[in-house]
Amino acid sequence: MKKILWFLTLLLVVFVGIVLVNQEQIMHPKKRELQAYHFDWLEYPQKHGMKIEQHKSKESTPYLVVVAQTPKSKRQRLLEEQLKAQAFQKSQGVLVLLHGKNGRKEDLLPVAERYITLGFTCILPDLPRHGESKVDTLYYATTPKEQAYVDEVLDDASQYVKIDDELFIWGMSLGGAFAIQTVTHSKYHFKKMVLVATFERLDRVLKEKSSALFGSFVGGLLYASLEKSLELFYNFNPSDSNSAKMAESIKIPLYQVHGEKDELISVEQGKILFKSFDSKEKRFVLDVEGTHHNILVTKHKFYKESSLFLSRVRR
């Protein structure tokens, strides 16, 4: 009998430990340090056809302002070659780029490298609890402060960049959820939006991950316990991060891409999210080779197609 009690106690400790570890990873994601390849962009921006300015807002939100600078890089020349039949206006406006969970703003410098060659000024902020952000806890764009997060950056960036009606937003995964909330709540008007591997609802991401790791029964118990723990300690329910619900009121043009082999956010979630948008002009692109981690480097013409979607052509 004692052995059974000891075993059950041990099982309970392990169960609670798994819940608490996952809770910590959800609310306090480990910050990713600057990688060696980041320094290549930061220290030698001219190699990448760009000029980088580093700023912090009044609320100490770190962000980068990236503009084009000659000579053009190999990536930029390749994109121009793909778009050689198009004549774009010299200035395209401002494009906000929002990184994914466990990422940081510097991850998107290779992305900005492409878009600035078309005439965009790119603004890259660190999301809450990421990079150099001083925010301690992440609430997945569900709080008023997080929903105004991009506005706060744009307010500050207006000292250095002209923020007018030519404003666009681009988000990947968690950044996509922030982009959707920003468009819904912002005092600024965004003309178009690009979403990459973005979830429909956070609770479904967590449930699917739990079931994949532990099976449907144990995984279901773990998620239910995790949900209760998050509500108790943080007054947060993952179901509150509902991108599909917010999308129902969004009418701006949308370009959305998702990897068929995405192991973190299922392509079914991406399709549900896409259908939720009230946009008259919207396009869903399925990358048959895409996973959650290679979606920006697979062979399909994402940068060409998204550039054509975002850009204004000279008439």
Image: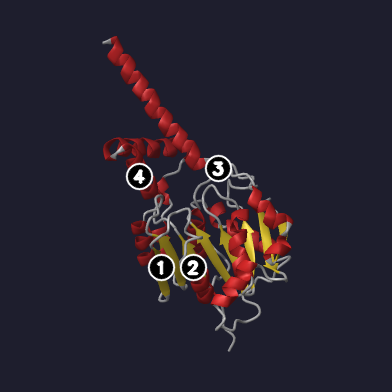
First in sequence, mark 1 or 2: give its number: 1
What residue is drawn where x is 46% and y is 37%? Answer: 23
Q: Badge 3, how many Cα within 10 Å: few under 14, some, many 20+?
A: some
Amino acid type indicated by mark 3: Thr
Q: Nearer the viewer, residue 288 or 99?
A: 288
Amino acid type indicated by mark 2: Phe
Q: Badge 2, how many Cα within 10 Å: few under 14, some, many 20+?
A: some
What residue is drawn where x is 47% and y is 59%? Answer: 295
First in sequence, mark 1 or 4: give its number: 4
The span from disc 1 to disc 3 (Cα, nearest Å) is: 33 Å
Q: Which residue is mark 3?
A: 137
Amino acid type indicated by mark 4: Lys
Q: Badge 1, how many Cα within 10 Å: few under 14, some, many 20+?
A: some
Q: Residue 2 appears at what percent x and percent y?
A: 30, 10
Mark identifier at residue 302: 2
Amino acid type indicated by mark 1: Val
Whether label 4 touches label 3, CB < 8 Å: no
Q: Which residue is mark 4?
A: 207
51 sits left or right of 292 in the view:
right
Mark 2: which secondary structure? Answer: helix
Q: Quadrant of the C terminus?
A: bottom right
Q: Nearer the viewer, mark 1 or mark 3?
A: 1
Above or below 68: residue 218: above
Q: Which residue is mark 1?
A: 285
The span from disc 2 to disc 4 (Cα, nearest Å) is: 30 Å
